Image (tube, grey):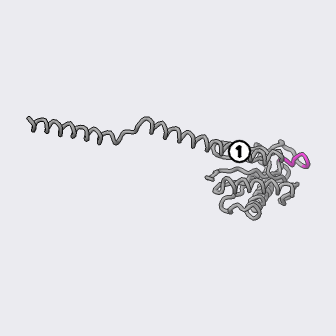
Amino acid sequence: MASTSSRIGRGVVGLFVVALCGCTGYVKKSDFDAAIAELRSNDQKQQQEIDAITQEMHQKFAQYDTQITAMQGRINVDTIAHFDTNQTTLRDEDKQRLDDFAKVMRDHHAAAVVTAEGFADPSGSAAYNQRLALKRAQAVRDYLVQNGGLNADQVRAVGYGKVKNRQVVKGATGDQGMPNRRVSLVTDFAGSS
């Protein structure tokens, strides 16, 4: 009888050990809830950082009447630099905007890929305006690299010339066409901070 009790006792202990081993793959509800709470907290923190960066950019560029648009992971900064007729030289008032843009990118998006998009007003031939717009974009790119501290591999330049669907003031030239003679910056890839 003692041997039967002993076997039953060992069997119960064995079942208990098997039950404990089988439970090692399970997560306690309290541990699960804590992990979910931590993930939500991290998500909120990241969203707050994104909101703060966006707010900082809006504040920096608001003084220049610049529009910033977020588009599916891209940031578009319109009216960053304007040019006089037939000119590719940056104006002094635009250099401060570019300095501010470069600082935000260096501080928050060091791995970002930026495209400087150049435009021209509708005066002149399509070929001439295409070259002019590209030179304007290259002037902005060069300034961001040489003076803004951005990596040359991260800043691209493209010229759109006098493309009608990208003119700010349709058909305007001369003083009224200044908004058309511009370089806009598009952050194609924001990178990670």
* Magenta run includes residue 70: no
User: Residue at 13% across / 35% down in the picture?
Assistant: 5
Judged by its main secondary structure, the magenta piece is: helix
Q: Nearer the viewer, residue 40 or 31?
A: 31
Residue 43 image offset from top left, x and y in percent: 58, 41
Q: Residue furthest bottom?
A: 146
Total residue callouts: 1
Stretch of the chain drawn in magenta: 174-179
Residue 82 image offset from top left, x and y in percent: 84, 52
- Within 10 Å of the Cα at label 1, are there few (<14), some (14-19), or many (20+) other Cα atoms? some
Residue located beneath label 1 in the image: 54
Residue 180 image offset from top left, x and y in percent: 82, 48
Q: Quadrant of the N terminus?
A: top left
Q: Give, as a three-letter code, the residue at label 1.
A: Thr
Figure check: 53 above or below 154: above
Q: Residue furthest left?
A: 1
Q: Residue furthest front?
A: 2
Q: Quadrant of residue 47?
A: top right
Q: Quadrant of residue 93?
A: bottom right
Q: Nearer the viewer, residue 116 or 64?
A: 64
Would residue 50 be found to the left or right of residue 85 on screen? left
Residue 62 image offset from top left, x and y in percent: 81, 45
Under circle 1, the secondary element is: helix
Q: Residue furthest right?
A: 175
* Magenta run includes residue 176: yes
Figure check: 15 above or below 94: above
